[in-house]
Amino acid sequence: MPITIKRNTVDLSNVKFVTKDDMAAVGQLIRQRIIERTARGVDAKGRPFAPYSQAYRELKREQLGASGVDLTISGEMLRAMVVEATEQSVRITFAR
């Protein structure tokens, strides 16, 4: 059953309360929070990233001089995040 909102007998059912720009702003905020959380080494549930396997850790140390979990070394992954917004939704995807 649809809900009709009226104020002072003016029908507001066709008024857009959220715009595509609003949703894009929400998406950009989410993107920024992902970047900041990743820089702290924390996953979406607030836990530290799981450690790399021994083999990958050694390979990373040889190639990059780092062995801890770091998703920001090249920055390519985080820079590739793209916000796609409509009036109803926000998607964060990765550009190819």
Image (spheres, rainbow, N blue to C red):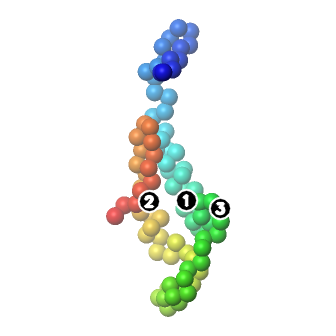
The disc placed on residue 81 is: 2
Q: Amino acid at mark 3?
A: Gly
The disc placed on residue 51 is: none
Label 2 vs label 3: CA separation? Answer: 20 Å
Q: First in sequence: mark 2 or mark 3?
A: 3
22 vs 94, nearest the viewer: 94
Q: Residues within 10 Å of mark 3 (few under 14, many from 20)?
A: few
Q: Is residue 65 left or right of residue 81?
A: right
Residue closest to the far right = 47
Which residue lies under the disc numbered 1?
Answer: 34
Q: Amino acid at mark 1?
A: Ile
Q: Can residue 88 be seen at all in this image of the molecule?
A: yes
Which residue lies under the disc numbered 3?
Answer: 46
Label 2 vs label 1: CA separation? Answer: 10 Å
Circle 2/circle 3 CB separation < 8 Å: no
21 vs 61, nearest the viewer: 61
Residue 49, image x, y percentages: 60, 71
Q: Amino acid at mark 2?
A: Met
Q: Residue at x 48, y 13 (%)?
A: 11
Above or below — where is 15 with respect to 84?
above
Above or below — where is 84 with respect to 54?
above
Residue 30, image x, y percentages: 54, 52
Label 1 vs label 3: CA separation? Answer: 11 Å
